[in-house]
Amino acid sequence: MTSDRIQIHCDGACAGNGRRRNRGGWAAILVHKGRTRTVSGGEPDTTNQRMELTACIKGLESVKDGRAGIDVYSDSAYLVNCFRDRWHERWVRNGWKNYRKQPVENRDLWERLLKLVARYDVSFHKVSGHSGNVLNEAADRLARAAMKEARPGA
């Protein structure tokens, strides 16, 4: 029996995380009613956290059935904990400042992601990275391959 919920398995990767002229990659694997679709891409001059968020955003942007519930699986505590612990509610309430009263990093991506999440019934699930989870491992391979295609900036 197949679930009516869409599964999105997403991952991000970055070589030279946070350094100049680095490369990042992201990937999402969507599974729904026995069908699988992948999306991936790379970006220069980025961070691992940005790639994790981008993977989730691109996965959600690829959803065609707006009525289906969505389960997002990620090995990113940054992504999953934000929704589990509702960090985003405090950020918005505090004018996009974190608990240290500093600007929230990656606000542009968080705002895009929050708009997408508001459109669907989304549940976030933390998975252990590099622990044999087949779809997480596949998303990791796709993200790493996409990372290699990104061209670092000047």
Image: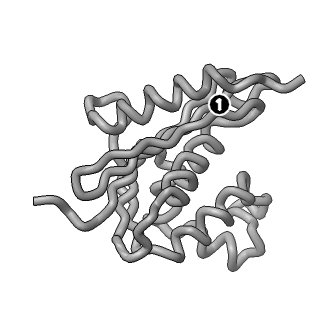
Query: What is the tally of numbered marks visible in this picture?
Result: 1
Name the quadrant containing residue 136.
top left
Q: Is residue 101 left or right of residue 134?
A: right
Name the quadrant containing residue 16.
top right
The amino acid at mark 1 is: Gly
Which x, y percent locates residue 32?
29, 56
Hey, which residue is sitting farthest left in the picture?
1
Which x, y percent locates residue 63?
46, 61
Q: Is residue 51 left or right of residue 124?
A: right
Which x, y percent locates residue 122?
41, 68
Which x, y percent locates residue 43?
70, 34
Q: Which residue is mark 1?
A: 24
- Label 1, secondary structure: give it: strand
* Rendered position, 71 above or below 17: below
Identified at 53% across, 23% down, the residue is 145
Q: Is residue 91 left or right of residue 125?
A: right
Hey, which residue is sitting farthest right in the picture?
154
